[in-house]
């Protein structure tokens, strides 16, 4: 495949039109010319992934959609440049692999592993300013978490650092992962996402293939039907995820499926439900019904983290292990009830011994949270809680 841009006028026009649509959650670069120069530079930077690998993942996700495999996706909420170290990456990959082994044994089917790694550097935020009135931290690819106005100013050169860090992380994934771990991140920062592409003419319509990740997902905050994120995803040949929260109606879900899987390709689209443990049993069934009736074969994946976030009495953003398990149990019940495949889970986990989520076998309590609360964004299950979770999901798979 040829790198994009490559002089293909039709494809260039499609991409320009997609990216001209309104895009929320983008930084306002103080020096737009510098941002454009960085994007230009990245056009010739080394890709992080290869189209052959992505094609293999696409086949494996088709098997998940058909009920013949299970999908485990996980890693940090936000990767940071400081934590892009061999011990951290190794610990996260080992945790993912240990979880996968437990799940594969219980499911009696292959487990496809996708890490939130080698590019998970951009974060959507609910508020534009933080508690100190400073512009909010938007991930290491955009600004710094340090609490000064200078540190929080978006810096387009960070896209170059992100690319270099992602390349280093991917080298380690290949070394440790034996080629069977794929990488993913949220398709959020469009200046970065459009910078490393191939022109993909292997399908029925011209598409672009991302050189930045095998799998990209659209977040809950950037899935506007008329927005740039959905339009850009329509043009990608990679498998795509879409987060859907409790505000998504069955009709809207069906519309997303038509837009993002126009040719009815099994596994092309992964619908990532993140409803919260209290709502999943009520909200998910009509969505599954409607999508099933449309005939599209999507991957149904449960994100049991983002609908179950709360603030502890001592002021920490946290999640309770029991709520995480409860949402997954609800997800399994819904799919078993409807005869569809509960295809996978999408979790925020680390192999490190952090204290960010409550509960689990070791019973982390609110008073324990300050000890090792290290996340740059959302709370992650630690190594032990992650394996506890895999054991709970294994029980559900065996039921
Ligand atoms: C995330 O996956 O870190 C995230 C922000 O999720 P959501 O878009 O579902 O809120
Ligand atoms: Mn998160």
Image (spheres, helix red, strand yellow):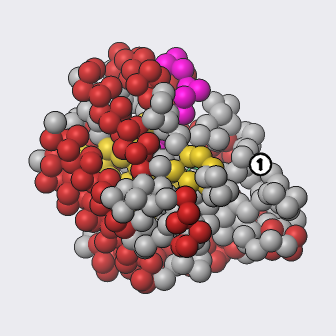
Whether ligand 1 has any atom under 8 Å from the Cβ at mark 1 is answered as no
Q: Is residue 239 above or below residue 348?
A: above
The answer to whether residue 380 is seen in the rendering is yes
Q: Is residue 276 left or right of residue 124?
A: left
Residue 62 found in image quarter:
top left
Which image quadrant: the N terminus? bottom left
In the rendered image, residue 244 lying in the magenta stretch gets the answer yes
Label 1: few (<14), some (14–19) or many (≥20) C-alpha neighbours in 10 Å: few
Residue, x 88% and y 58% (percent of image)? 133
Residue, x 16% and y 36% (percent of image)? 399
The residue that disc 1 covers is 127
Q: Is residue 208 above or below residue 213?
A: above
Q: What percent of the width, then of the height, locates residue 338?
A: 28, 20
Residue, x 43% and y 73% (percent of image)? 353
Residue 141 found in image quarter:
bottom right
- Near-viewer residue (236 or 397): 397
Task: Describe the element under mark 1 as helix, strand or loop.
Answer: loop
Residue, x 81% and y 57% (percent of image)? 131
Residue 223 found in image quarter:
top right
Q: What percent of the width, then of the height, locates residue 154?
A: 79, 66
Q: What percent of the width, then of the height, locates residue 308?
A: 52, 42
The answer to whether residue 68 is seen in the rendering is no
Q: Is residue 345 left or right of residue 316?
A: left
Which residues make up the magenta segment? 241-251
In the rendered image, residue 26 lying in the magenta stretch gets the answer no
């Amino acid at each position: 495949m040829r790198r994009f841009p490559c002089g293909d006028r039709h494809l260039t026009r499609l991409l320009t039109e997609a990216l001209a649509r309104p895009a929320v959650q983008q930084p306002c670069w103080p020096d737009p010319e510098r941002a454009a120069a960085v994007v230009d530079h990245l056009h010739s930077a080394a890709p992080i992934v290869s189209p052959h690998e992505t094609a293999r993942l696409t086949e494996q996700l088709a098997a998940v959609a058909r009920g013949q495999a299970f999908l485990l996706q996980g890693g940090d909420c936000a990767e940071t440049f400081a934590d892009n170290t061999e011990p951290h990456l190794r610990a996260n990959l080992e945790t993912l692999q240990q979880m996968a082994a437990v799940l594969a044994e219980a499911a009696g089917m292959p487990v496809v592993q996708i890490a939130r790694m080698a590019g998970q550097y951009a974060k959507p935020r609910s508020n534009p300013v933080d508690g100190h009135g400073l512009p909010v931290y938007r991930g290491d690819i955009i600004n710094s978490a340090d609490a000064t106005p200078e540190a929080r100013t978006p810096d387009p050169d960070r896209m170059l650092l992100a690319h270099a860090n992602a390349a280093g992380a991917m080298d380690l994934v290949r070394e440790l992962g034996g080629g069977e771990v794929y990488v993913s991140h949220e398709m959020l920062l469009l200046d970065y996402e459009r910078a490393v592409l191939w022109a993909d003419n292997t399908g029925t319509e011209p598409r672009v293939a991302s050189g930045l990740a095998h799998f990209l997902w659209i977040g809950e905050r950037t899935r506007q039907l008329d927005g740039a994120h959905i339009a850009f995803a329509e043009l990608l040949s990679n498998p795509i995820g879409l987060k859907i929260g409790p505000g998504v109606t069955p009709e809207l879900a069906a519309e997303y499926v038509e837009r993002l899987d126009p040719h009815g390709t099994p596994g092309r689209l992964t619908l990532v439900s993140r409803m919260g443990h209290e709502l999943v049993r009520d909200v998910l069934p009509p969505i599954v019904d409607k999508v099933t009736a449309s005939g599209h074969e999507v991957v149904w994946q449960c994100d049991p983290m983002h609908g179950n976030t709360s603030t502890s009495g001592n002021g920490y953003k946290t999640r309770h292990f029991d709520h995480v398990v409860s949402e997954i149990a609800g997800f399994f019940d819904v799919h078993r009830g409807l005869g569809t495949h509960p295809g996978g889970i999408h979790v925020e986990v680390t192999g490190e011994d952090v204290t960010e989520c409550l509960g689990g076998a070791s019973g982390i309590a609110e008073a324990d949270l300050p000890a090792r609360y290290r996340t740059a964004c959302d709370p992650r299950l630690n190594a032990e809680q992650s394996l506890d979770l895999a054991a709970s999901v294994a029980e559900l798979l065996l039921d």
